[in-house]
Image (cartoon, coloured by chain):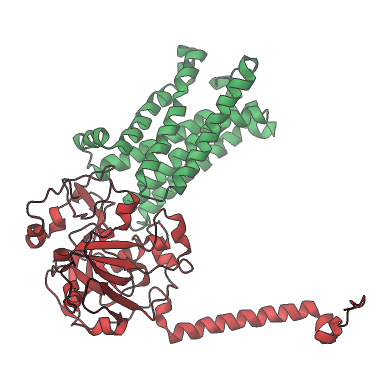
Amino acid sequence: MRIGRKPDLTYEDVTPKDVYVNRRKFLRDIGIAGAAAAVAGEKILSLASPNLTAYATSKLNFVKGPFSTDEKITPINDVTHYNNFYEFGTDKGDPAKNAQNFRTTPWTVSVEGEVKTARKFSMDEILKLAPLEERIYRHRCVERWSIVVPWIGYSLSTILKMFEPTPKAKYVAFQSYYDKDQMPKAKYTGLDYPYVEGLRMDEAMHPLALLCVGMYGETLPNQDGAPVRIIVPWKYGYKSIKSIVKIKFQEKEPPTTWNLTASNEYGFYSNVNPNVDHPRWSQATERRLGEIFTRKTVMFNGYGDQVASLYNGMDLKKYH
Amino acid sequence: MRKLLTSKWTKAVVFLVSSIPFVLLCVGLLRSDLGINPVETLQHTTGDWTLRFLIFTLAITPLRKTFKLPELIRFRRMLGLFAFFYVTLHFITYLGPDQSFNFSGMWDDVAKRKFITVGFAAFVLLIPLALTSTTGWIRRLGGKRWQALHRLIYVCAMLGVIHYYWLVKSDVRKPLIYAFFVGILLLWRVWDAYFRGKGSAPAPVQTGVSAAG
């Protein structure tokens, strides 16, 4: 093969002359057109799918559920702009900032493991499994702040009862969604992802444990664990795993993210307990958001009447 | 540069700039604009500025020697006192909102929780440094002893960084940034003492009149 000295094609052959002569103008025009298209595209997208922004939640129909506290509800702005969702960053304001474009449709939750027949649920199916209830729960973070939130959902047991567990099913494990492209901050947070959590079967079946799809009358905002999460109000907040994609019945105690990160500081049970300190700070008091001074933390976050019997005879210091 | 460093106005400007974080906190407090957990904002901001001013203070001598700018020493006392000012605010925001000014609760915390223990130790160790920062005390103690006492700031800076490192749950990036700067500034001193030995001029001790001139 002969390789010619002279190229067979010149710029004239591929690019119209008036374009390459005026290439600066051409580039500028392309830039303007591109920007216009991007703006228009974003507008159209936001019209078509309002869930693209963290604040665009939609109304839910619900009834008043049991176990609600009559304590003052924390303002929605505090709950949506001060929380932990480490996949989106470690500052309390990060989830609100960085979860805005988190895609939550389509969404599937897989229920599997030690059950006769595993199956997957679409978000539509989850929303229609049972009448939605509003439950106003106290929520106590291990970092010693607390909030009161009107969650919407139904007892986790509702979905678990649809399955025939094998005799081996002793625990229920949960897994969060993880996508490093959508959650670029996650890799600097010191945790391994996907985030995992778990409950003992009797804890998971307890009517207080909530499969949560909304709050404050609407679907969950992205930063608070959209579209579906677990709420376990008598345990520290990190047990209430967000944006779940998997529920698994299993025989062994499931690994849990914070326990894997620092096993001496975060146990599997993680019940709110003012008598068992975190190794680095006391758990005897907490600050309710909106208050200056701290208040006393209550055993099982005030849900002792309902759940204390689950732990009869257990050394709660050892099984913290 | 010399002229700028020795001007009395420069000192005033440094003072005003160093007060900005405090002024902003006061404005935020008055306008109820300190975020969703204002107490935490106060605690974290005053803690951050304490560490920063400790680092500024520790940076004076390396900068002074490296760039042969002895006039920089004029600012060291003020920067150190600002570190003490912010740590005092930091302590008050803990003692007040967290402990409701209850000293027995505070002692419990200090005794039981190592991150509070080291933070409190750093605060206590800074007190004698602030008290003896005056020209009168330099004279009373004598330059050598005064300097030995004020080397406590090395310990305080290290304890401060450990305090922060032990506080965070898993994301240690910010404490490590402080650790980096404190580490560099302390290692520079080791290096300086080892290689320059006694040949280098002893660090001048600031005496009010001459240094302010």
Residue reaching furthest to the right: A5
x, y percent for residue A229? 28, 70
Q: Nearer the viewer, residue B97 or A184?
A: A184
Q: Nearer the viewer, residue A123 or B201?
A: A123
Question: Which tint is chain B?
Answer: green
Q: Nearer the viewer, residue B30 or A92?
A: A92
x, y percent for residue A294? 22, 49
Q: Is residue A294 left or right of residue A93?
A: left
Q: Is residue A15 visible?
A: no
Question: Residue at 60% of width from left, 30% of height from top?
Answer: B62
Q: Quadrant of residue A107?
A: bottom left
Q: Quadrant of residue B202?
A: top right
Q: Is residue B203 visible?
A: yes
Quadrant of the image containing the N terminus of chain A: bottom right
Q: Nearer the viewer, residue A172 or B52?
A: A172
Number of numbered discs? 0
Q: Which chain is red?
A: A
x, y percent for residue A14? 81, 85
x, y percent for residue A55? 38, 74
Residue reaching furthest to the front: A1
Q: Is residue B159 left or right of residue A160?
A: right
Question: Residue at 13% of width from left, 70% of height from top?
Answer: A207
Q: Is residue B53 left or right of residue A318?
A: right
Position above or below: A217 against B159: below
Q: Quadrant of residue B10?
A: top right
Position above or below: A261 against B202: below
Question: Residue at 40% of width from left, 33% of height from top?
Answer: B159
